[in-house]
Amino acid sequence: MKTESTTLIEAEKEFAALIYRDRGALDRKAQAILIHGSRQITIRLGNDELARARQQAEAKGLKYQAYIKMLLH
């Protein structure tokens, strides 16, 4: 018979296993990206600039992040 604490411990172990599995997948994805010479960055844009980029991207049928990346290239 399982007690409440035993069930809680098992649930925590399962959760920890999921986190480490997901972390491993993220690490592998990050390594693959770095090998190809690309990495994620964060930039700050003004609300007006971002709105303009979204409008222009939508007019071209693109996602705005892809559109901004295209402009940088």
Image: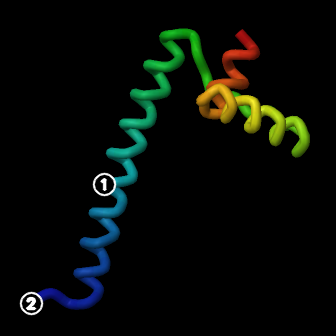
- Classify mark 1: residues with Cα within 10 Å, few (<14), some (14-19) or many (20+): few
Judged from the image, the secondary structure of the residue bearing numbered disc 2 is loop
Against 2, is 48 above or below?
Answer: above
Q: How is the image coloured?
A: rainbow
40 with respect to 49 (left or right): left
Q: How far from the left and from the top, in percent, is residue 69?
A: 68, 20
Which of the two discs, 1 and 2, sits closer to the camera?
1
Identify the residue under disc 1.
17
Mark 2 residue type? Met
Q: Residue at x 37, y 45 (%)?
A: 22
Residues marked 1 and 2 touching at CB (< 8 Å): no
Q: Label 1 to label 2, Cα distance in Å?
A: 24 Å
Q: Is residue 55 above or below residue 22?
A: above
Residue at horizontal 34%, vertical 63%? 15
Quarter of the picture containing the N terminus is bottom left
Give the image quarter of residue 56. top right
* First of labels 1, 2 by sequence position: 2
- Residue 36 locus on image (x, y percent): 50, 10
Q: Which mark is residue 36?
A: none
Residue visible at 78% across and 32% down? 53
Residue closest to the eye, 56 or 65: 56
> Badge 2 is on which residue?
1
Q: Residue 57's image quarter?
A: top right
Residue displayed at 30% across by 79% down: 8
Where does the image place residue 24, in percent across and percent down from the top left?
A: 37, 37
Of the 4 image quadrants, the one containing the C terminus is top right
Q: Residue 31's x, y, as percent?
A: 46, 21
Name the residue type under label 1: Ala
